[in-house]
Amino acid sequence: MGHETPSNNLTEKSLAWENIRTEVDAMTDALGKPVDSQIKEAVIAIMAHEFPTIGSCEGHIDEGAERPLYPYVMVSSPEYDGWKESEIVTNIMIAENLGYQKNMIVLLNEFYETHNSPFDSHLSFEGFGPTWGFKLRSVGADVMKILTSDEKERKLALYRQEMDDFAKFLKNKFFAEVIP
């Protein structure tokens, strides 16, 4: 392998980013719906940092909707065959997911070293499932359930902005790293 020039690094990074974008563009949920447009960049950025995503939502405040009020991205290792019957396999999945949480904590710490925002918009984890995958979402997400319609709209915009800012941080970090 030769010396990596900045332009070659940028080209390789751009190709990798676009490959992830193509993958995300092809993703659909159980109803056949694509990734929500207002969370797509965050999904791409998170995947670019080698986190496996299994779900996401941009957040919705439609009255009566059975959808989440807040934006999130779910990160989890894949479910391995036989995990329900094997404690060893289950423990492997748990260890992988805890590793993803550890790595995300490093990124969030770096992000919040320079990013100022209201505490309730700060990104945090909500655990789910028996394998300890997590939702990356704002700290104040659950409180949205008791807010007025106007407050929900303001918080949704704030929480989407926080996720967008984190996605931009991740994208900048991705393109700044040099491929060995």
Image: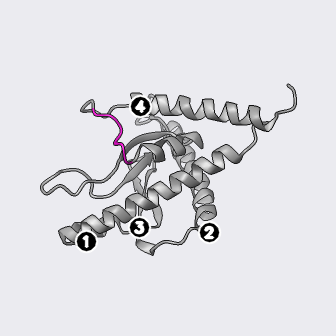
Calculate the distance from the C-alpha at mark 4 to the C-alpha at mark 1: 32 Å
Q: Quadrant of the N terminus?
A: top right
| Left or right: 45, with 178 as reference point | left
- Kind of residue at disc 4: Asp
Q: Which of marks 2 and 3 is nearer the N terminus?
A: 2
Q: At x 64% / y 45%, what residue is drawn?
A: 174
Q: What element carries label 4?
A: helix
- Residue annotated with mark 3: 139
**From what the image shows, is residue 139 above or below residue 88?**
below
The residue under label 1 is 151
- Which residue matches tag 4? 25
Q: Is mark 3 on a helix, strand or loop?
A: loop
Residue type at the position of mark 2: Thr
How far apart are the alpha carbons under marks 2 and 3?
18 Å
The local secondary structure at tag 1 comes to helix
- Residue nearer the viewer, 96 or 30: 30
Please provide percent x and percent y for residue 121: 42, 68
Q: Earlier in the sequence, mark 4 or mark 1?
A: 4
Task: Give the extent of the magenta segment.
Answer: 33-38
State the predominant SS element of the stretch in magenta: loop
Circles 1, 3 touching at the beta carbon (< 8 Å): no
**Depth order, front residue of 118/55:** 118
Tell me if mark 2 has few (under 14), some (14-19) or many (20+) residues whose alpha carbon lies within 10 angstroms of its own: few
Residue designated by label 2: 114
